[in-house]
Amino acid sequence: MPAIALDDVSFSYGSRLVLNRVSLHVSTGERAFLTGPNGIGKSTLLKILTGDLTPDSGRVVSGVAPQRIPDPESFGGTVAQFLDSALAPFKELLLRFEQVTEAIASGQAGLASEYDQILARLNALDVWSLDSRVNETLAGLGLIEFTGSGVNRMLVTLSPGQRARLKLATLLIIRPEVLILDEPTNHLDGEAIDFLATVVKNWDGPVLATSHDRAFIEDTATVIYDMDITVWQELAKVDGEEIVGVYRNAGNYTDYLAAKATARERHSQIHAEQQDEKRELHEHRHKSMKIARGGVRVETAVGIQKKFFMDRAAATAVKRTRNDDVRLERLAQREVRKPRHYDLEFPALESDPGSGLAVSARDAAVAGRLTPVTFDLGRGEHLLVTGANGAGKSTLLNWIASGNPPTTVTSIGTITRDEPVGQVPQRLPVESDPGLGSHTWTNGVGEAGKGVLHPSMWRTPIPDLSAGNQRRAQLAIALARRPAVLIIDEPTNYLDLETMDALEDALCNWQGTLIVASHDRWLIEHWEGRRLHLRPVRQAVSKRD
């Protein structure tokens, strides 16, 4: 039976250790996901399994048989030629089957065994339904325009997202025994993600994937391998055990979150108990040293009595301190480190937001971008804006943030809002963004990053931060304005799973007025505030007289 297995694998990029003694096993029927912060080595591990990287030590027990899938980025032909190249082994197998069949029919002997082997292989690969599978998969991943005459499109004319989807479709069409997916939902809309989830859940062999799409993980995962193993290591230390590499959690994303939350709570409890025990032992040891001085009896005794009391006090003190030292040594062997804090802590509001309206829209519309929308948002309320691409979510948020409609196109209606406004756009920061400027751009966010960005990065120039930390910096800058209204477009963009969950907790607990636009299915499904769904733009808006 096919499987995915690594045994004690380590890998470094130069002097930086990325994977340390990783062992994992994914059996047939299991759908495993790798989780952990960006840069922890998830994609590196997948490349080792596919043979694109060689580990420094350890071994790949069961990996992925090489698939001859061309790279759409460098392929110079049409969609049809790309698919023909990728599916060539299937057609070669089918051609050989036809040749063997004809040879047997003509009376040639000794081919029965080969005939049976090829037939079994064709059935296993379901080559008989290959043409329908190609069309079904292309349509399912939003590439229906490349079926029929569309297969003659040149790959060079495709967008990066279309090329990525075409490569994913080809992999699914080939149906390898072992499926490896690295961020497969990138460039997919909701319908395409649902199609992919159905395919993955019905996959016969083992599946190992990475993803930032929590809803996709929730829907498909049976096992999660956590590469951020700190909390698991600390708990194992208490029992005198060791955990390296990855930690295995059975179940879906909800199960994983619950298990890790319990582990963190237990870690914090053990740390607090151990620190109390350590303080008590040190206090006891300090009292023992006082005993060694003999107390009042030594001070008042003379002669041989004084020596007797001093010897007895010293012996008692030595016995007690030795016992304390032994207990401190044993405690040190199982002492856990202080828990790391994953929470984002937004600054508290300086005053109660009070009552009344924070935002009010009346028939606000933009030609070709935003259909008329009317709503009122009270102070302290949270609003989630959803809608398909092109429905005008960013247009609406930018209008609210700036206080003015776009000037390059026709608009109608009005939007009023409280001030000041803090805004985090969908994209990463640029120097001209409000609240940035040349000083912050080159010297970092400073103490404005408190609770949002790690202190070690407060003085780091914005361009030198990772994408995830640039996103944190944007949040810090927006919150530093002490906004009456906070607007965030696609808040989970660029963040790892851990930070997404922490950010959503912070947003939920923030008492200010909040407007968020998002495609994130997990965020949408778990949103507890008000909602506004924008309809697609169907026709231009005319300016009122």
Image: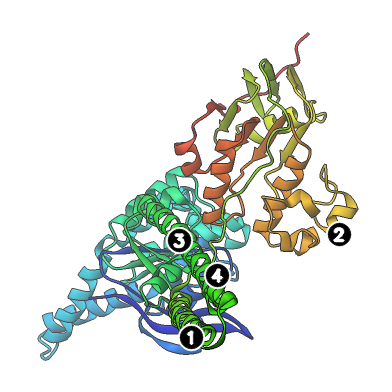
Disc 3 secondary structure class: helix
Q: Earlier in the sequence, mark 3 or mark 1?
A: 3
Name the kind of residue labelled 4 in the image: Ile
Q: Residue at x 62, y 62 (%)?
A: 156
Q: Give the left or right position of residue 77, taking residue 370 as reference.
A: left
The one nearer the camera, 460 or 103, is 460
Q: Which residue is mark 4?
A: 40
Q: Disc 4 or 2, which lies upstream in sequence? A: 4
Q: Is residue 333 left or right of residue 511?
A: left
Please name the amino acid that badge 2 sits on: Thr
First-in-chain label (4 vs 3): 4
Instruction: Read off the residue under disc 3.
Output: 273
Number of residues whose C-alpha sits closer than 10 Å to that of mark 4, classed few (under 14), some (14–19) or many (20 or more): some
Q: CA distance from mark 4 to mark 3?
A: 31 Å
* Crowd around label 3: few <14 · some 14–19 · many ≥20 (10 Å): few
At label 3, which amino acid type do we have?
Answer: Glu
The residue most toward the right is: 438
Dot 1: few (<14), some (14–19), or many (≥20) neighbours within 10 Å?
A: some
Point out residue 85 in the picture as x, y percentages from the top left corner.
Answer: 45, 72
Badge 2 or badge 1: first in the primary sequence? 1
